[in-house]
């Protein structure tokens, strides 16, 4: 055990010795948290919509049919009360609900109004969903316009769940967490191990009294601690600088983050077994991690709006599941059971990547 701790201390001193790397590792989250304020969005498709039928009339039915015939919305089901619709949104079974409401006195029944209730955890998408729905529902039919209140708020109008202030920070904070943790853990771990091989010191470490597996774990431990430091930095900035609430259990957030960090470390170990030089490891990390994380994880572009082929590719991108889980835990405040699917996928990925990496590592020793 003393030898293992000595290896951990050695690697920690090596990391702390490089001041520029430490500045980048802790400076990058701060800069991104402060500057990454606007997310790029594209046209949305297949928004799951629930219709409340308590006040339906022939004219409102025509408006709903126009909405269903568009390429942007899918009427998944109808319910009797707004409370049922809200429950479906909170259970992630719908994205938006439409409730026809009686027209104000004196305006007659030809100009119905609506209440739009939408999942506001992603404010940019919520804004687009609402604008699209308003545009379609207010189109003239039989010479009549179906008007909508355009203001966001409670009552007759649009109601945003989870993010009534429409702040983009609610969306990008979980995304930054997913991107930084996998980049730092996987990239830095792979480069650290490859550096030993490139300098010829890996053979010296492997013939030491410590088992080869313990050597690899000892080199990964400092990056595990570093990842937790970055995670805590992001959470503190999100809560006290950006005002993003941590609605869910902090224990659940840390537990899911721990699993994700182990997944990233396993990926870094796999890259280190394939790459022979630090440059190759860096290029592989950039190609395998950076572009898929930005493009296919749902960080910027919604996965639901992508072509089917890209949706299949996005299904194997680990940050996608972590970002979804963090949005649910941090913003929506759900329990750990609501992210069981994301946790199960990340756990399976961790086991597979770690098994492949260890198998390749043993083959290299032989």
Image: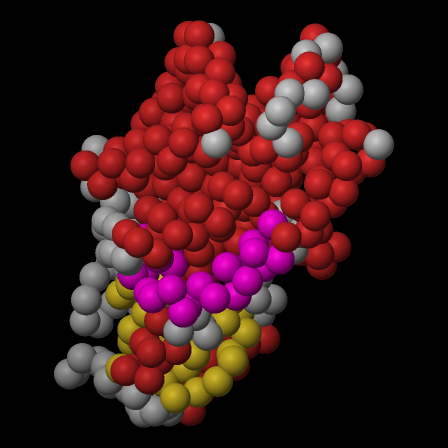
**Residue 70 among magenta residues:** no
Q: Which residues are magenta?
A: 326-350
Residue furthest left as drawn: 105
Residue at 56% over, 56% down:
347
In the picture, the quarter occupied by the C terminus is top right
**231 over 250 or under it: above or below:** above
**Residue 340 among magenta residues:** yes
In percent of width and height, residue 160 lies at 29, 62
- Asked if residue 175 lies left or right of residue 306, the reply is left
- Asked if residue 74 lies left or right of residue 352, the reply is left
**94 over 170 or under it: above or below:** below
Displayed quadrant of residue 39:
top left
In percent of width and height, residue 94 lies at 45, 73
Residue 121 visible (yes or no): no
Residue at 37% over, 41% down:
173
**158 over 98 or under it: above or below:** above
Residue at 23% over, 49% down:
245
Displayed quadrant of residue 203:
top right
In percent of width and height, residue 298 lies at 53, 48
Q: Nearer the viewer, residue 153 or 110?
A: 153
Q: Nearer the viewer, residue 202 or 271?
A: 202
Residue 92 visible (yes or no): yes
In percent of width and height, residue 336 lies at 38, 64
Q: Nearer the viewer, residue 325 or 258?
A: 258
Q: Nearer the viewer, residue 213 or 236?
A: 213
């Amino acid at each position: 055990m003393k030898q293992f701790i000595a290896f951990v201390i050695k690697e920690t001193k090596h990391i702390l010795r490089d001041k520029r790397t430490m500045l980048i590792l802790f400076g990058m989250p701060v800069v991104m948290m402060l500057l990454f304020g606007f997310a790029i969005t594209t046209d949305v498709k297949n928004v799951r919509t629930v219709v409340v039928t308590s006040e339906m009339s022939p004219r409102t039915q025509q408006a709903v049919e126009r909405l269903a015939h568009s390429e942007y919305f899918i009427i998944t089901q109808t319910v009797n009360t707004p409370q049922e619709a809200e429950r479906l949104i909170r259970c992630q079974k719908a994205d938006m609900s439409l409730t026809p409401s009686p027209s104000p006195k004196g305006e007659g029944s030809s100009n119905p109004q609506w209440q739009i209730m939408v999942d506001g955890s992603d404010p940019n998408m919520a804004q687009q969903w609402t604008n699209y729905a308003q545009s379609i529902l207010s189109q003239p039919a039989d010479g009549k316009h179906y008007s909508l209140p355009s203001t966001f708020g409670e009552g007759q109008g649009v109601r945003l769940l989870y993010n009534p202030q429409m702040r983009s920070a609610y969306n990008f904070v979980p995304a930054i967490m997913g991107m930084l943790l996998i980049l730092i853990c996987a990239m830095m771990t792979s480069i650290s191990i490859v550096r030993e091989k490139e300098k010829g010191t890996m053979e010296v470490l492997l013939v030491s009294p410590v088992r080869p597996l313990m050597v690899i774990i000892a080199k990964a431990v400092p990056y595990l601690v570093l990842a937790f430091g970055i995670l805590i930095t992001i959470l503190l900035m999100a809560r006290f600088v950006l005002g993003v609430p941590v609605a869910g259990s902090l224990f659940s957030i840390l537990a899911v983050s721990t699993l994700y960090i182990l997944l990233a470390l396993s990926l870094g170990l796999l890259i280190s077994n394939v790459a022979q030089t630090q440059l190759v490891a860096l290029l592989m990390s950039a190609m395998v991690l950076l572009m898929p994380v930005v493009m296919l994880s749902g960080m910027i572009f919604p996965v639901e709006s992508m072509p089917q082929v890209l949706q299949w590719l996005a299904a194997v991108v680990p940050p996608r599941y972590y970002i979804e889980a963090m949005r649910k835990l941090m913003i929506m405040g759900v329990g750990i059971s609501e992210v069981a699917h994301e946790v199960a996928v990340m756990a399976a990925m961790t086991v597979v990547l770690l098994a492949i990496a260890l198998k390749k590592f043993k083959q290299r020793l032989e």
